[in-house]
Amino acid sequence: YKTAAKPIPHRYVLSGTPAPNDESEYWAQIKMITGAGNDCFNMNYYAFRSKYFNSIALGLTGQKMFKFRRSMQKEFMEAMKPVTHIVSKEDALDLPEQTHLIRKVFLSKEERKAYDTMRDDLVLRFKDEMVLSQTALTEVMKLRQLTSGFVYGENETYRTGQSKIKELDGLLEEIGNHQVIIWVNFRYEIRRLIARLSGQIVIDNNEPYIPDCGALWSETKDRDQVIKDFKDNKFQYLIANPQSAAHGLTFTNCKYAVYFSLNYSYELQKQSQDRIHRIGQEHSTTYYYLLADKTVDEMIYKTLLRKGDLSKMVLDYLKKGK
């Protein structure tokens, strides 16, 4: 930031989600703007973190997490006031309402057994391989996969069920002939859904309807054409990975989004929601979250809500202080 900031007399940082995960993400932005002119941020990052965050050890791994000290919250936000200006989307635009709905997914006996075994024993045994989870991070990753009915092994991918896909089938029937963006996080989910949605399903009155779908992910060959075709209503479903499609795209032709799976990034979550809720949208937008009952899905969803509440609280405080 020093190299970028030094020759520039006036500096601005523009962001719709300035600190999507926690308050530590404000440090570099304010530091670049103020340099040494702000006592709160006039220190290196590690001194800043030590002052405003508590260090929490993660078991015996040697790793740490840092949690903001709420006793320092007012001092922290007061220090940001002089150099912040908040304009929310609601202040600047007259957009339709957003509705967020949870769809519970109940795992089959086989899926539940696989999930519980991985959670408790950190290992799943298949015919040709044992799938191991050696760290807490990989354990969560494997559990996320299992809620979607599969798990990656070292040599191949193993299917464990299709409860979430069946729930998606029912939801798409309810939505009917409207366009839908389906957000996923794993390559295997995309391949599986492309195969699923390219087949024949029944929508209303037992009349067959053959949907087509596009996909935005790392293997998309003609990204611009897929985007154009979806906007032109040439196919009904767009299957997308948030890392490939959560930023900079406008799909106001669509008013429904389904989160087949989630990750921990609030920024990607918020940005993906805004692909359909932006200038030009004339209809209320609806977001569905497919959450497997009593699984890591629910934990991730609650984490995203907490991050969203935290981000909103800070921005609201700064806005009211003007």
Image (cartoon, rainbow, N blue to C red):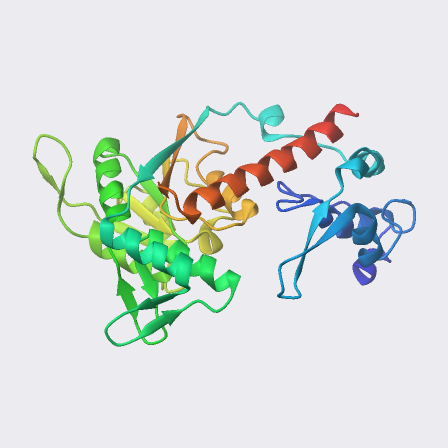
| The image quarter in which residue 205 lies | top left
Question: Would residue 218 appear left or right of 58 to someone viewing this image?
Answer: left
**Dividing the image into 4 quarters, which one contains the C terminus?**
top right
Residue at the spot 75% in from the left edge and 37% down from the top edge: 70
Q: Residue at x 50, y 39 (%)?
A: 302
Viewer-proximal residue, 4 or 239?
Answer: 239
Residue for point 15% across, 45% down: 210
The picture places residue 80, in percent across and down from the top left corner, at 81, 38
Q: Is residue 217 visible?
A: no
Q: Residue at x 20, y 45 (%)?
A: 211
| Between 303 and 86, the one nearer to me in the picture | 303
User: Residue 168: which quarter of the image?
Assistant: top left
Q: Nearest the camera: 157 or 202?
A: 157
86, 293: nearer the viewer:
293
Please tell me whether residue 97 is drawn above or below residue 72 in the rendered image.
Answer: above
Q: Answer left or right for 163 relative to 292.
A: left
Residue 148 rendering spot, x and y as whole percentages: 32, 52
| Quadrant in which the N terminus appears | bottom right
Q: Residue 192 in the image: x percent, y percent?
A: 26, 57
Q: Is residue 264 left or right of residue 79?
A: left
Residue 292, quarter of picture: top left
Q: Is residue 180 visible?
A: yes
The x, y position of residue 180, in whole percent, is 32, 40
